[in-house]
Image (tube, grey):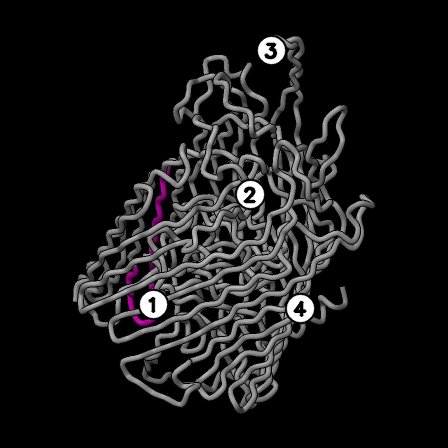
């Protein structure tokens, strides 16, 4: 508690004692980066967030020469250190990234936002992201590693924020952009947008459609995404804005494979009745108030109305051919409303500039989840029959409440050194109200016993987390930075109750707690080399994991708190300008080579399961390397990339031999190559890409549920061509 009180005093006292705002407003100056860098870092104060002393990464998506049409994750995020990626399919419908020992599934360990507001189903109770904006609509992607817990939420992963394109500064009332893509396996994509500024009003809107048949049988998809924002400047001090996002998609899922099936033919599928559908609607209202030249207030109200439905045959023995008959149906609906307000104030003490950020958040969510066995054919019918009571296996409602306040303060000791303490106060109340059924059938599949179990749970808890960061800028421009912050992850709705044939859940499961720390050096050498090299450590208490466990005559997969774990390692990104290294300059040519290397060690430190202690964590490759070459000649650009990940375990007991369900076992090391080309001339652009250039047979995950269970193969070699135009 003393540590937290000290932090609070460090954060707030400088703003309250002896501070005088002696500033005067100057004429606005716009700074433009003329270099074609597609990767960088956040400023110490960036928009309405403080990033001083933190491990930050920014992808300038509009400057990338990669396959944007399919949201190809390993290409778009190629320079983000240490990311582990699940590849569910080649459509790019869902983003699944993790890092530092965190589960990549649907990016559930990051606080995922769009233009600063939440887009996941429930930031604490169900933090899975079924909606991902198309890369073609993005200006940049911002990532703040674990130290983002104090400003944006307590997740171990940190912040992932998608920043949409905005009208250009040329003041044109209408700019039109259109990109049309065709590719392998029947892929068709169409992105079309309008943007402009007229007086005090600015706007941006797009529609995005894509469809495809998939690399494997039984894997077609169709997706429609639309977005619009309007921002109106009432005067020099007040701005109001509204944003709306809609996503609807339907995907047929080919299911998982066991190890023998994968070795025999990774393209095969024995699931012809598995479907997945998502409907996502986001609304954001914003008010920005420039109270004074160095004082800002931003208040937003945002909400979500969404659903995700899945149906299919999901037997634990994935080699069993679907015999027809009943299918497993999971229906989920999500509604939430959030108010978040941020106050940013810059002031001086003596001649030193200080920055204070404080904020509050109030959240109310309500989710429903129903699961059962239905016999309704082979198509995408996500409805229960007339005898719903006989089909249900579980029926739950999940009210969720969250109230929090936070503060961070940049204290500048001198022109080179600053310290940034922060604190966050949280109150969470997670509730579950529902019922689940126990049924026993005889060998003829006739019901011989049924029991309905009512269940009602409420878990209120309040806590305080803190952290501190610091950075020192040398005279040559290099920056030494470091931070340590506490983290917290609430148990999710799935942790409270989920009926799933693949695993069972410990009823005593509790929240996860821990901390993360970074120490790094970033900068450049004579405009020839840019780098960011850091070491990190993450302590994970009460970590939730999965192990094989005996149950009667069977071995099942059990999920619960397995103990404390430690992940530590090195993350590095080094980029070099080849021409400048050779002492040459050429206006027509550009050449960059980069290496993104993460070396990670993970270990279970303690556990009630003796067979877990000392083992590696799930989905933590010891070596995660991405390297590439970027060439440019006038209007031509080329990007060549190599990705390599070493072996990974998929459960805490480090099973190697796979069971018939194939949800446990090794994910073997793999190396992939991708190639992208681009050409532009005035209003016209042409882009092409080849994914998995060497046609490597690989997989990135063993799924416990949808889109499996079992091995989900990565796609083989594929080709894509995009033609676009943008009005001048």
Relative vertical location of residue 487 with respect to residue 260 in this rendering, above or below: below
Cβ atoms under marks 1 and 2 closer than 8 Å: no
Distance, label 2 to label 4, CA atoms, is 26 Å
Let me know if residue 13 is in the magenta part.
no
- Between disc 1 and disc 2, whose residue precedes? 2
Callout 3: SS: loop
Relative vertical location of residue 509 with respect to residue 629 in this rendering, above or below: above
Marker disc for residue 126: 2
Let me know if residue 241 is in the magenta part.
yes
Distance, label 4 to label 1, CA atoms, is 39 Å
* Residue 515 visible, this orientation: no
Marker disc for residue 638: 1
At which x and y percent is residue 341? Answer: 48, 60
Callout 4: SS: strand
Q: Specify the quadrant that holds the C terminus.
A: bottom left
Cβ atoms under marks 2 and 3 closer than 8 Å: no
- Between disc 2 and disc 4, whose residue precedes? 2
At which x and y percent is residue 593? Answer: 44, 74
Marker disc for residue 682: none
Q: Closer to the observer: label 3 or label 4?
A: 3
- Between disc 2 and disc 3, whose residue precedes? 2
Asked whether 124 or 681 is in front, the reply is: 681
Marker disc for residue 445: 3
Distance, label 1 to label 3, CA atoms, is 59 Å
Callout 2: SS: loop
Classify 10 Å Cα crowding around label 3: few (below 14), some (14-19), many (20 and above): few
Q: Closer to the observer: label 1 or label 2?
A: 1
Q: Specify the quadrant that holds the N terminus.
A: bottom right
Classify 10 Å Cα crowding around label 2: few (below 14), some (14-19), many (20 and above): many
At which x and y percent is residue 427? Answer: 63, 51
The stretch in magenta equals 231-249
């Amino acid at each position: 508690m003393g540590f937290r009180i000290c932090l609070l005093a460090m954060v707030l006292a400088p703003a309250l004692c002896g501070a005088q705002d002696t500033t005067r407003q100057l004429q606005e100056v716009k700074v433009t980066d003329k270099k074609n860098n597609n990767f960088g870092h956040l400023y110490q104060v960036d928009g309405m967030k403080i990033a001083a002393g933190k491990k930050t990464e920014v992808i300038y998506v509009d400057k990338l020469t990669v396959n944007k049409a399919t949201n190809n994750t390993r290409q778009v995020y190629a320079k983000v250190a240490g990311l582990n990626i699940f590849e569910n399919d080649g459509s790019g419908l869902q983003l699944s990234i993790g890092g530092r020992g965190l589960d990549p599934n649907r990016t559930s360990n990051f606080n995922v936002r769009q233009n600063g507001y939440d887009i996941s189903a429930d930031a604490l109770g169900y933090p899975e992201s079924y909606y991902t904006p198309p890369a073609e609509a993005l200006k940049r992607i911002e990532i703040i590693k674990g130290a983002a817990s104090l400003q944006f939420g307590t997740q171990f992963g940190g912040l992932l924020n998608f920043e949409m394109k905005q009208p250009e500064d040329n003041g044109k009332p209408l700019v039109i952009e259109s990109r049309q893509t065709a590719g392998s396996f029947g892929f068709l994509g169409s992105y079309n947008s309008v943007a402009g500024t007229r007086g005090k009003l600015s706007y941006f809107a797009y529609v995005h459609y894509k469809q495809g048949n998939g690399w494997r049988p039984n894997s077609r998809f169709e997706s429609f995404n639309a977005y619009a924002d309007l921002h109106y400047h009432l005067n020099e001090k007040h701005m109001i804005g509204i944003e709306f996002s809609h996503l609807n998609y339907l995907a047929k899922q080919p299911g998982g494979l066991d190890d023998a099936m994968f070795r025999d033919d990774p393209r095969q599928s024995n699931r012809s009745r598995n479907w997945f559908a998502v409907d996502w609607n986001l609304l954001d209202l914003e008010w920005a108030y420039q109270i004074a030249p160095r004082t800002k207030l931003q208040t937003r109200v945002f909400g979500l109305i969404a659903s995700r439905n899945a149906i299919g045959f999901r037997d634990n023995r994935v080699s069993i051919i679907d015999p027809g008959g009943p299918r497993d149906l999971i229906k989920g609906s999500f509604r939430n409303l959030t108010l978040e307000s941020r106050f940013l104030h810059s002031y001086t003490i003596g001649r030193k500039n200080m920055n204070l950020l404080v904020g509050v958040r109030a959240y109310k969510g309500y989710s429903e989840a129903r699961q059962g066995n239905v016999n309704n054919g082979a198509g995408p019918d996500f409805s229960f029959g007339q005898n719903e009571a006989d089909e249900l296996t579980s029926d739950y409602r999940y009210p969720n409440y969250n109230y929090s306040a936070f503060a961070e303060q940049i204290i500048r000791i001198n022109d080179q050194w600053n310290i940034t303490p922060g604190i966050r106060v949280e109150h969470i109340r997670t509730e579950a109200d529902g019922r689940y059924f126990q049924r026993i059938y005889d060998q003829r599949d006739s019901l011989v016993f049924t029991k309905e179990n009512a269940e009602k749970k409420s878990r209120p808890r309040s806590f305080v987390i803190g952290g501190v960061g610091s950075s020192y800028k040398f005279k040559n421009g290099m920056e030494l930075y470091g931070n340590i912050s506490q983290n917290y992850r609430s148990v999710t709705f799935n942790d409270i109750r989920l009926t799933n044939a693949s695993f069972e859940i410990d009823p005593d499961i509790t929240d996860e707690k821990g901390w993360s720390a970074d120490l790094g050096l970033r900068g450049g050498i004579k405009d020839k080399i840019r780098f960011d090299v850091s070491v990190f450590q993450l302590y994970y208490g009460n970590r939730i994991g999965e192990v094989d466990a005996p149950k009667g005559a069977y071995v099942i997969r059990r999920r619960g708190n397995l103990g404390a774990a430690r992940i530590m390692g090195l993350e590095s990104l080094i980029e070099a300008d080849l021409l400048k290294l050779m002492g040459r300059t050429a206006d027509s040519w550009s050449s960059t080579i980069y290496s993104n290397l993460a070396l990670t060690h993970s270990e279970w430190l303690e556990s009630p399961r003796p067979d877990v202690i000392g083992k590696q964590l799930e989905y933590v490759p010891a070596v995660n390397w991405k390297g590439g070459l970027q060439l440019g000649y006038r209007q031509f650009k080329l990007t060549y990339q190599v990705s390599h990940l070493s072996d990974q375990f998929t459960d805490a007991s480090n099973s190697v031999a796979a069971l018939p369900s194939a949800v446990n076992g090794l994910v073997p090391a793999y190396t992939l190559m991708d190639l992208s080309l681009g050409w532009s001339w005035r209003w016209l652009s042409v882009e092409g890409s080849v994914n998995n250039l060497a046609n490597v047979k690989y997989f990135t995950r063993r799924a416990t549920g949808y889109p499996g269970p079992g091995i989900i193969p990565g796609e083989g070699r594929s080709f894509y061509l995009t033609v676009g135009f943008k009005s001048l």
